[in-house]
Image (tube, grey):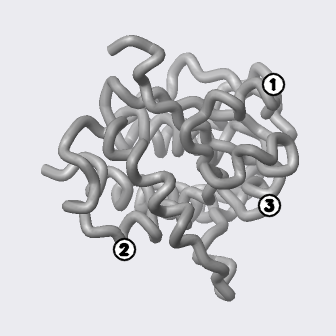
Amino acid sequence: MALENCFRILCVCTGNICRSPAAERLLAARLGPDVEVTSAGTYALVGQPISPPMDQLVRDAGAEPDGFTARRLTERLVQPADLVLALTRAHRGDVAELWPKAVRRTFTLKEFARLLGEVDPAALPDGSPGERLRAAVPMLAAHRRQVTDLSLDDVVDPYRQGAELYGQAFADIEQAVTAIVSVIRPR
């Protein structure tokens, strides 16, 4: 598929070594070749690989963590993204502050999965995952609403925490990715 026809997703967290690369690698592995998925961090540990505990969780889930290097979030990364998936509401706000025009295509990962789960899959066009995502983004932006339970939107930061917190963060990411893929790439 020609690069200009790809649907581009940018995943955003803080250090770009735990949550956003996990979301990036899972989405890339499960959505197919017409979706390009990258990630960046608001305070990235530039040049670092995925943290070892998250690397193993990504690998165990059947995605490829090798070859990843963290990078800092910039306007240049946000501008061409068709969808920005932030790992917390604060990251979503950082993206909107950096590039205000991205606000209608920026969601938290869990928010996007939740809103997509409320859409009748038949309302999306038959076609590739990229085509279905392209139709879904404006539809979901029009139905966005505030939530009072903050846990509905944020994925906890496991950096330098124990295996249990890495597992919790990864489970939230994998659950959201699975929900997105089940609508975008129905069997």
Disc 2/disc 1 C-alpha distance (Å): 37 Å
What's the residue at 64%, 83% (across, down)? 147
Secondary element type, mark 3: helix
Q: In this view, does 168 lie above or below 80?
A: below
Looking at numbered disc 3 in the image, what kind of residue is underneath it? Ala
Marks 3 and 1 sit apart, C-alpha to C-alpha, by 20 Å
Direction from residue 34 to residue 65 in the image, left or right: right
Which is more foreground, mark 3 or mark 1?
3
Amino acid type, residue under disc 2 in the picture? Glu
User: Looking at this view, is 166 or 178 the one in front?
Assistant: 178
Q: Which mark is residue 118?
A: 2
Q: Residue at x 70, y 45 (%)?
A: 102
Looking at the rendered structure, the secondary structure element under dot 2 is: loop
Label 1 CA crowd tier, 10 Å (few <14, some 14–19, many 20+): some
Residue 46 has which mark? 1
Q: Indicate which label's residue lies in the foreground, 2 or 3.
A: 2
Residue found at x 58% / y 60%: 169
Query: Is any atom of residue 30 visible in this view?
Result: no
Amino acid beneath label 1: Val
Mark 2 and mark 1 lie on one chain; the one further toward the N terminus is 1
Q: What residue would you read off at disc 3? A: 90
Residue 57 horizontal/vertical position (percent) = 47, 45
In contact (CB < 8 Å): disc 3 and disc 1: no
